[in-house]
Amino acid sequence: MMNTLLKTQKNLERLGYTIKVFDDKAQATDYLASKLKGKRIGLGGSVSIGEMGLYERLQESNTVLWHLRLSAGDDVMQVRKAASQAEVYITSVNGVSKAGEIVNIDNTGNRVAAATFGCEKVYFIIGKNKIAPTLAAAIDRARNVAAPLNAQRLGLKTPCALRGDQCYDCDSPQRICRNLSVFWRKPTGCEYEVLLVNETLGY
Ligand code: SF4
């Protein structure tokens, strides 16, 4: 796996991203907490971020906007919008190919929009379980692994959530897969840093 991680690291560097590699999520969390002080930070809907305890940690020294931690009276769409216009945006991804193509599937689109344009700096957090051999395999992983688990986590009545095995390309009104984003390489509009974590993180 280390070999795969190193190859992915080299390819992401070649595509223009700044890369840091960490042994585990605690190291990655410490790194972000040490780098980010006094910033306005938006967080994407991400199980990896929850597992890292990143919201709580970054809140110690920053203003953090996350629609998964609302205060009384907050409007979820307003928080999503504010997060996408913050100085810094942090999110995980649904898949990355060994060649460095980054894949995300989204519903409301706030995560792919914020990661694509508007913030000054974007951090992608990628656990080793997100690495796939090809772009097609990364998209397949996003559709058939990440999305069904996210639908289950959200308690939806989609066929993938009820059966828990794969995507059924459903017509459910609760369908969460409405938008596919592939970064072929680093966009030019803002700074990007990828944190590769050599352990399983999120899904
Ligand atoms: S398209 Fe429907 S069935 Fe497929 S993963 Fe998304 S919500 Fe589940």
Image: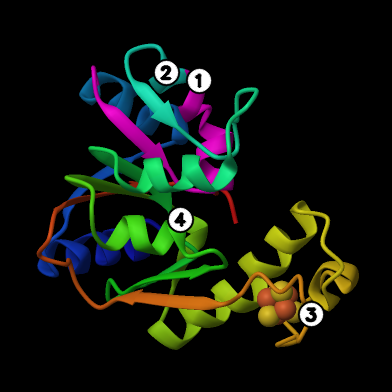
Q: Are marks 1 and 2 in contact (CB under 8 Å)?
A: yes
Tag 3 or tag 2, which sits nearer the N-term?
2
Residue at the disc numbered 3? 172
Q: Which mark is residue 59?
A: 2
Query: Ligand 1 falls in which quarter?
Result: bottom right
Where is 101 relative to 112, above or below? below
Tag 3 or tag 1, which sits nearer the N-term?
1
Tell me how far mark 1 sits from mark 3, CA to CA: 34 Å
10 Å crowding of disc 2: few (<14), some (14-19), many (20+): some
Q: Quadrant of the C terminus?
A: bottom right
Where is 34 relative to 129, above or below? above
Within 8 Å of ligand 1, the CB of disc 3? yes
Tell me how far mark 2 sits from mark 3, CA to CA: 37 Å
Mark 2 vs mark 3: give the one in front: 3
Tell me how far mark 2 sits from mark 4, CA to CA: 26 Å
User: Which quarter of the figure has residue 171?
Assistant: bottom right
Q: Quadrant of the N terminus?
A: bottom left
Mark 3 vs mark 4: give the one in front: 3
Look at the image and give the residue range highlighted in magenta: 37-56
SS class of the residue under badge 1? Answer: helix
Tell me how far mark 1 sits from mark 2, CA to CA: 5 Å
Tag 1 or tag 4, which sits nearer the N-term?
1
Within 8 Å of ligand 1, the CB of disc 1? no
SS class of the residue under badge 2? Answer: helix
Q: Disc 1 residue type?
A: Glu
Residue at the disc numbered 4? 128
